Image (cartoon, rainbow, N blue to C red):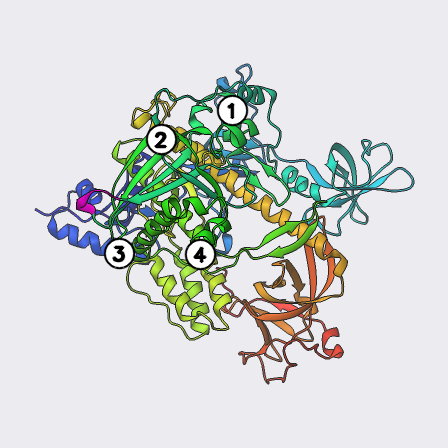
C-alpha cells in the first residue's frame, strides 16, 4: 500500500521545523520523514523542482539544502513599529525590501512574564521604535500575524534625539542643520539658553520640543558630540548617527594592556618558514601571511603546498571577557577614509596580533595541499608560533613578479614569491572551473590631504597580487568550514542566497529591452550571470547590466545554519582569515581550537545553536551598520570636495531611476547626486519599472539606468553628503504607448533649449501599476 503524497504545506512545515532545530533538509530527509517509496521519491523530485521554480523554496534538495523562500530565520533583527488594539507590540524585519517582496510580515511580540518584569535589575521593557533581536515562532491561523517573537536582546532604544550641525546666531540662539539627506531644508530653531554651550560647527544631539505647522520646530541641545569644522572629523557624523561604539571602556583597555606575550608553549615552531604578509601599502595591521612550495610527494607531481597563517586573536580575547563583550558589540572594525574604528584595542590589533616583520607572533595556520589541476587534496590546521619574513605591499610584490624587484623583494623573489605565484596559477584553474560570479565594477578610493580633505579620487589598479591573496583566503575559509562540519562543531557560516524569483524576473525584463533572452530552465548558477556579462562586454550596455546584475544579488550574511554561498559557488564557507577585524572569524578560530583540541581557550562546549544564532544576527546587523556609515562618510567627503564647484559640469551615468527622478554617478569621482523629475523638461514623465527608465508621454524622450549623461552641479550639502544636478544632455527617443510623436533631441553633451528646460515635468506611475 503506497503512502499518500504529502501536501506542499506539510513539506514546508517540515522544512521549517528541521531548520529551526539546526538540521539541513534535502530530498532524502523529506522522503524519509513522509515514508515515500521509490515512486514517491520521483514525484518528490519533480515537486521540489516546481516549488523552486515558483519561488516557494530555494535549493534543489540534492546538491543544495532546501530552505523556504521568504521564510524568516529563527532569530531576527527587527524593529518594533506599533501597538495593536490589545496593546501588544508589533514588529517587522529591520531589513525588508517591500518593492521586491511586498508588505513586510507582522510579528507579534510576546509579552514578558510578569514575574520576570518585576525582578530587580531586569532589562528595560522594549517599546515602539526599538531595534530588538527576536526568537521567532511561526503562527498558523492567527489573523494578521505570520510569527510571534520573544525578545532576546534590545539592540537600540528608540532615538528621541536628532543629530545635526549647530549654527550659532548673533543673539545667542542657534539653528540645527540636519545631517539626514531626507531632512534637508527642515531646520530647527534652538532658543537662547537651550544651546548647551554648543559652539558654531559642533555636531550636536537635540530633542525636538515643539512642532509647528507654519514654522520650524524648536529644539534643545542634549549633547555636544564634537566639532566638524575640518573634514577630518566628518566621520564623527556617521559614528554618532549609527551609534557605532568608538571608545573602549577602561576595563577593556586594561585587559589589553595586561595581555601577556604568547610563547611557544602548546604551539608548533614555524619561525623558520618564510611566510610573508602582502597588504595595502597603508595597512596598519597584518592578520594574514602566506607561503607556497612544490609538493615533495611523488604521488602529487606538479602539486603545491599552500600555507595560510592567521593571527591567533583567540589567545588574547577569551570568551566572556570584557574584550570579548566589546568585540561582539562592535561586530567588526569600521573603515573610514580618515580613521579606523577598530573592533579591538590597538594593543591587540596593531601590536600583539599584527604579524610584524621579523617578530615572533602566535597564529593558527592551515596547510593546504593542491593537486596539479588546482583541486584540494588535503588540508590540516596547526597552532603555531611564526615570524614574518617580509612585509610587502601589493604593488611591491607585483613589481617583483613583473621583473622589477626592489631591495626587499630581490632576495626572496625566486625562493618565496615565484612559488606563491605558481601555486596561485594552479589554484586559479580550479577557481575558473568553479565559475564564481564575476562582476566588473570599479572601486574608487579617496586620497586625502594632510588636513583630512579630499585631494583626489582614484580607481586602484587590480593586480594579480590582489587576486592571489583573495584566492588563498577563500581556500582557507573553505577548509575551516569543512573541518568544523566534519568534527560536528557549531560555527558561524558566511552565506549568500541565490537571487529571488522577483529579482530574476526584473533582470529578464531589462535584458529583453536590449535583445537578450534570460534562460528560464535549469538550476540557477553564477555561470548564468557570467555568460550574460560576457555577452555585453565592451558594449554600451556593459555598465547598465553589471549594475542590474549586482542589484539582482541577495545580501551576504552570517548564519549559524548553512545554506551555501551562491556568489562564490561554494557549498560551505566560513570567515576565518580576519579575526582582528571580524567577530565571525574569532568564533571560527575558537571552534577550531575546541574541535581540534588545540588549547583551553576555544569555543565553550556549552555553546548552543540558539546562542550562535543570536551572535550571527548581531554581527550581520553590525556589518550593515558599518557599510552604511562608511558609504555616508564617503558621500559627505566628496560633497565637501565638490562644494566649491557649483556651476561646473560633469560626465556621468544614471545609477538609479525612480518616480521622483534620476540618480547620477559621476565618472571621475564616483559621486552620487539627484536630478528631480520636475526639472527634466516640458513633459509628463512616466516611471517604467521594467525598463528602469523615465519616459516622456508626449515626446518619448527617456532616461534609463546606465545611460551616459552630462550634468551641472547646482547644489551641494556637505553635511548631508547630498548633491543636486541639472541635466544638460538630451535623453534617448523611444516610442511609448502614450507618445504620439517623436522629437529630435540635442546631441549628447549639448544643452536643450532653455524654453524646454523651463517646462514642468511630473513623474507618473508605470502602466503596469505593479510594485516589484
Q: Secondary structure at mark 2?
A: loop
- Of the residues under marks 4 and 2, which one precedes in the sequence? 2
Residue neighbourhood size for the residue with mark 3, other residues' Cα within 10 Å, grouped as few (<14), some (14–19), many (≥20): some
* Label 3 – label 4 distance at C-alpha: 50 Å
* Label 3 – label 2 distance at C-alpha: 50 Å
Residue 637, given in percent of the width and then of the height, sits at 67, 50
Magenta stretch: give its range: 295-300
* Label 4 – label 2 distance at C-alpha: 29 Å
Marks 4 & 2, CB-CB < 8 Å contact: no
- In the rendered image, is residue 142 in sight? no
- Which residue corresponds to the image point at 32% horizontal and 46% vertical from the top-left? 67
Quadrant location of residue 484? top left
- In the rendered image, is residue 689 in sight? yes
Identify the residue under disc 3: 49
* Label 4 – label 1 distance at C-alpha: 43 Å
- Of the residues under marks 3 and 2, which one precedes in the sequence? 3
Closest to the camera, between mark 4 and mark 2, is 4
Residue sitting nearer the eye, 127 or 297: 297
Residue neighbourhood size for the residue with mark 1, other residues' Cα within 10 Å, grouped as few (<14), some (14–19), many (≥20): many
Residue 698, given in percent of the width and then of the height, sits at 62, 79
Identify the residue under disc 4: 402
Quadrant location of residue 706? bottom right
Identify the residue under disc 1: 323
- Which residue corresponds to the image point at 76% horizontal and 57% vertical from the top-left? 644
- Of the residues under marks 3 and 1, which one precedes in the sequence? 3
Closest to the camera, between mark 4 and mark 1, is 4
Closest to the camera, between mark 3 and mark 1, is 1
Q: Which mark is residue 270?
A: 2
In magenta stretch: residue 4: no
Closest to the camera, between mark 1 and mark 2, is 2
Amino acid at each position: 500500500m503506497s503512502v499518500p503524497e504529502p501536501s506542499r504545506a506539510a513539506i514546508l512545515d517540515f522544512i521549517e521545523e528541521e531548520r529551526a532545530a539546526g538540521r539541513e533538509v534535502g530530498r532524502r530527509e523529506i522522503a524519509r520523514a513522509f515514508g515515500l517509496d521509490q515512486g514517491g521519491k520521483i514525484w518528490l523530485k519533480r515537486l521540489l523542482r516546481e516549488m523552486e521554480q515558483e519561488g516557494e523554496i530555494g535549493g534543489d534538495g540534492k546538491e543544495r539544502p532546501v530552505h523556504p523562500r521568504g521564510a524568516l530565520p529563527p532569530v531576527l533583527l527587527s524593529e518594533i513599529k506599533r501597538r495593536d488594539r490589545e496593546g501588544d507590540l508589533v514588529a517587522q524585519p529591520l531589513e525588508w525590501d517591500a518593492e521586491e517582496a511586498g508588505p513586510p510580515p507582522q510579528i507579534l511580540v510576546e509579552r514578558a512574564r510578569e514575574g520576570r518584569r518585576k525582578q530587580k535589575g531586569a532589562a528595560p521593557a522594549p517599546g515602539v521604535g526599538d531595534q530588538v533581536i527576536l526568537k521567532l515562532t511561526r503562527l498558523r491561523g492567527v489573523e494578521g500575524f505570520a510569527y510571534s517573537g520573544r525578545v532576546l536582546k534590545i539592540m537600540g532604544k528608540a532615538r528621541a534625539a536628532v543629530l545635526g550641525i549647530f549654527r550659532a546666531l548673533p543673539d545667542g540662539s542657534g539653528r540645527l542643520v540636519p545631517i539626514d539627506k531626507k531632512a534637508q531644508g527642515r531646520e530647527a530653531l534652538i532658543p537662547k539658553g537651550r544651546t548647551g554651550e554648543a559652539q558654531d560647527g559642533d555636531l550636536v544631539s537635540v530633542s525636538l520640543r515643539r512642532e509647528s505647522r507654519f514654522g520650524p520646530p524648536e529644539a534643545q541641545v542634549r549633547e555636544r558630540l564634537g566639532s566638524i569644522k575640518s573634514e577630518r572629523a566628518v566621520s564623527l557624523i556617521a559614528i554618532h548617527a549609527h551609534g557605532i561604539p568608538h571608545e573602549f571602556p577602561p576595563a577593556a583597555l586594561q585587559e589589553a594592556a595586561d595581555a601577556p606575550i604568547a610563547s611557544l608553549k602548546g604551539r608548533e615552531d614555524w619561525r623558520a618558514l618564510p611566510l610573508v604578509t602582502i597588504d595595502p601599502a597603508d595597512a596598519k595591521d597584518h592578520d594574514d601571511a602566506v607561503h607556497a612550495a612544490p609538493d615533495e610527494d611523488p604521488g602529487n607531481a606538479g602539486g603545491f603546498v599552500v600555507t595560510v597563517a592567521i593571527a591567533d586573536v583567540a589567545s588574547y580575547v577569551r570568551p566572556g571577557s570584557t574584550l570579548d563583550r566589546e568585540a561582539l558589540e562592535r561586530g567588526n572594525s569600521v573603515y573610514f577614509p580618515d580613521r579606523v574604528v577598530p573592533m579591538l584595542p590597538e594593543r591587540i590589533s596593531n601590536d600583539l596580533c599584527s604579524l610584524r616583520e621579523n617578530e615572533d607572533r602566535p597564529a593558527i595556520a592551515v596547510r593546504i595541499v593542491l593537486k596539479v589541476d588546482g583541486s584540494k587534496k588535503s588540508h590540516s590546521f596547526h597552532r603555531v608560533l611564526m615570524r614574518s619574513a617580509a612585509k610587502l605591499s601589493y604593488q611591491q610584490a607585483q613589481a617583483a613578479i613583473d621583473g622589477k624587484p626592489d631591495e626587499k623583494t630581490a632576495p626572496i623573489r625566486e625562493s618565496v614569491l615565484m612559488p606563491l605565484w605558481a601555486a596561485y596559477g594552479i589554484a586559479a584553474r580550479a577557481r575558473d572551473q568553479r565559475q564564481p560570479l564575476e562582476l566588473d565594477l570599479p572601486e574608487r578610493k579617496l586620497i586625502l590631504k594632510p588636513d583630512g580633505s579630499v585631494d583626489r579620487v582614484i580607481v586602484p589598479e587590480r593586480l594579480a597580487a590582489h587576486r592571489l591573496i583573495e584566492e588563498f583566503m577563500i581556500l582557507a575559509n573553505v577548509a575551516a568550514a569543512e573541518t568544523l562540519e566534519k568534527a560536528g562543531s557549531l560555527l558561524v557560516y558566511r552565506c549568500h542566497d541565490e537571487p529571488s524569483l522577483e529579482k530574476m524576473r526584473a533582470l529578464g525584463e531589462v535584458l529583453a529591452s536590449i535583445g537578450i533572452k534570460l534562460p528560464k530552465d535549469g538550476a540557477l548558477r553564477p555561470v548564468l550571470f557570467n555568460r550574460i556579462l560576457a555577452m555585453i562586454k565592451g558594449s554600451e550596455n556593459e555598465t547598465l547590466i553589471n549594475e542590474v546584475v549586482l542589484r539582482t544579488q541577495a545580501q551576504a550574511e552570517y548564519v549559524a545554519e548553512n545554506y551555501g554561498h551562491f556568489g562564490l559557488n561554494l557549498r560551505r564557507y566560513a570567515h576565518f582569515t580576519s579575526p582582528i577585524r571580524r567577530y565571525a572569524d574569532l568564533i571560527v578560530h575558537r571552534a577550531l581550537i575546541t574541535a581540534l583540541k588545540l588549547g583551553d581557550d576555544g569555543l565553550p562546549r556549552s555553546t548552543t545553536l540558539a546562542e550562535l544564532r543570536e551572535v550571527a544576527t548581531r554581527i550581520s546587523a553590525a556589518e550593515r551598520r558599518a557599510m552604511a556609515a562608511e558609504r555616508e562618510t564617503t558621500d559627505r567627503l566628496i560633497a565637501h570636495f565638490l562644494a566649491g564647484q557649483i556651476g561646473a559640469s560633469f560626465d556621468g551615468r544614471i545609477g538609479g531611476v525612480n518616480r521622483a527622478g534620476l540618480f547620477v554617478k559621476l565618472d571621475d569621482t564616483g559621486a552620487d547626486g539627484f536630478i528631480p523629475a520636475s526639472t527634466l523638461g516640458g513633459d509628463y514623465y512616466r516611471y517604467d519599472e521594467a525598463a528602469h527608465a523615465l519616459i516622456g508621454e508626449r515626446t518619448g524622450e527617456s532616461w534609463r539606468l546606465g545611460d551616459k549623461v552630462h550634468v551641472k552641479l547646482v547644489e551641494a550639502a556637505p553635511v548631508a553628503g547630498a548633491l543636486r544636478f541639472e541635466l544638460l544632455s538630451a535623453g534617448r527617443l523611444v516610442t511609448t504607448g502614450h507618445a504620439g510623436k517623436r522629437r529630435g533631441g540635442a546631441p549628447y553633451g549639448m544643452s536643450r533649449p532653455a524654453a524646454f528646460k523651463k517646462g514642468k515635468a511630473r513623474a507618473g506611475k508605470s502602466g503596469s501599476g505593479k510594485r516589484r
